[in-house]
Image: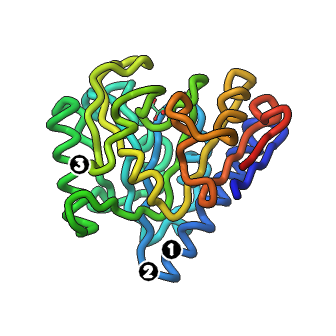
Amino acid sequence: MTRLTSCPDAESVAVRAAAHVRRVLEQARAERGVAHVALSGGGTPERTYRLLGEDPEALAGTEWWFVDERCVGPEDPESNYRLAEEALLGPAGIPSGLVHRMRGELGPDAGAESYENELRERFGGEPGEPVTLDLVVLGIGPDGHVASLFPGSATLTDERALCLGVHDSPKPPPERITLSLPVLRAARDSLLLALGASKASAVAATLGEPTASVPASLLRRGRLTVITDDAAAPAAPNPR
Ligand code: 6PG
């Protein structure tokens, strides 16, 4: 069952989201001695990242991955890595050895191959087997996209890859690198954040019939926590 929480405003969403992340990290450390978290870009999670960055002790033993990245350099204002570095990794003093940056500057295909190799090297497993992250932090587009997995895209049907190159993102920039749907679904916990009325129908569709036209609806429901502000909360959620 998906856990859905609505908060009065963006700040309370961020406070609740940061508390959720800290709980997941603590449990992962207790069970396996390490936590693996993948971060999304976009504007929604920034405040959550800043709150997490204020409490470095709560982040101990964590390795930081990325859900997706734009095919730009790490210094580019569009870079998801740059967002995470400025809001969380830098303020918390996370050593670079614990940060697995998607190398967007390589371009979609070479960048995806490089990241796939890094994931396989760190997690092992056979080709075609997903790897298991402890947490993926997701935003959602008004069209129901998560990561850089867009409605109706062939990337949604790839059952073997860990990481994919995107050449035609409807959300600029067009070239990106993204974790695959099997990796998102294999994560022990998925946290989806949504702010504002423009996301309300996408959030409602996330909880409805699974369909490739709403990529978020293909996430694993039993491992999904959705935290929204009141404006993005579905009027009448129809969780499955
Ligand atoms: C990206 C993100 C993307 C984002 C959604 C929501 O690289 O753009 O990973 O999936 O989470 O588009 O974006 P906002 O949070 O800015 O609304």
**Left or right position of 220 against 10:** left
Q: Which mark is residue 84?
A: none
Q: Amino acid at mark 3?
A: Tyr
Q: Which residue is mark 1?
A: 28
Q: Which residue is mark 2?
A: 32
Residue sitting at x 44%, y 26%: 152
Element type at marker 1? helix
**Left or right position of 55 against 6:** left
Element type at marker 3? helix
Q: Nearer the viewer, residue 20 or 77?
A: 20
Residues at marks 1 and 2 touching, judged by CB atoms closer than 8 Å: yes
Q: Amino acid at mark 2?
A: Arg
Quarter of the picture containing the N terminus is bottom right
Estimate how packed mark 2 is, as few (under 14), some (14 to 19) or many (20 or more) residues with alpha carbons within 10 Å. few
Q: Amino acid at mark 1?
A: Ala
Dividing the picture into quadrants, the one containing residue 110 is top left
Residue sitting at x 85%, y 36%: 236
